[in-house]
Image: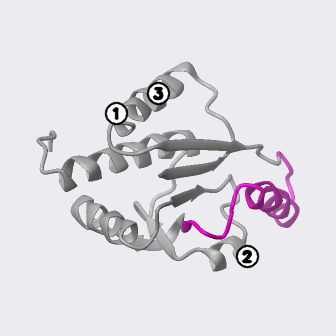
Amino acid sequence: MIRIICVGKLKEGYWREAQAEYDKRIQKYTNLSIIEVPDSMIDQEKIALEKEKEEILKHLTGKEYLITLEIEGKILSSIEFSQKLDQIFLSHSDITFLIGGSYGIHPDLKERAQFHLSFSKMTFPHQLFRILLLEQIFRSYKILNHEKYHK
């Protein structure tokens, strides 16, 4: 099972439609759960990160393999990403991806993660990034199953 914990909601319909499409595609390979926790909407970074951390912790069991999405993380190609997922599933039945809010991810959660992943040194809007992550998860399953997918 793959879970994605996201700070904030998808507001625009086109993001929700894109998410629904990838959800449908990924469900052919594994169960997918997307959990949205409230964005703290606080202008003080420390307080905002702490509030978001408390909300995120409600959804972590300690049994999952936690991957944080952060600029400082490791950059992988799509093939390397698919191999990483395959390797993780050999020892864990659940993978949880964590997408932080506008201030990122609380240091305690980063420390708890088993892997830190970056898609780029660039910053992306959280709504767009969620769709990028879903696309790469879907692409990984296509790669692992030796199925054709556009390049």
Q: Which residue is mark 1?
A: 25
Horizontally, is 77 left or right of 130 in the view?
left
| Residue placed under numbered mark 3 in the picture | 20
Q: Amino acid at mark 3?
A: Ala
| Residue type, numbered disc 2 | Asp
Question: Mark 1 or mark 3: which comes first in sequence?
Answer: 3
Mark 2 Cα-neighbour bin, 10 Å: few <14, some 14–19, many ≥20: few
Residue range highlighted in magenta: 41-65
| Image quadrant where one finds the C terminus | top left
State the CA–CA distance, disc 1 to disc 2. 33 Å
Q: Tag on residue 108?
A: 2
Secondary structure beneath disc 3?
helix
Question: As rendered, which of 26 and 15 lies closer to the eye?
Answer: 26
Real-space Cα separation, disc 1 to disc 3, in angstroms: 9 Å
x and y percent of residue 132 in the render?
A: 41, 45
Q: Are marks 1 and 3 in contact (CB under 8 Å)?
A: no
Q: Is residue 131 left or right of residue 146?
A: right
Q: Decide whether residue 71 is among the magenta residues.
A: no
Where 14 falls versus 49 (above or below)?
Answer: above
Q: Residue furthest bottom?
A: 111
Mark 1 or mark 2: name the one nearer the start of the chain: 1
Rendering coords of residue 134 (x, y %): 42, 44
**Rounded to the nearest whole Å, what is the CA distance between mark 3 and mark 2?**
31 Å
Which residue type carries mark 1? Arg
Of 72 and 59, the residue lying toward us: 59
- In this rendering, position of residue 41 left or right of residue 12: right
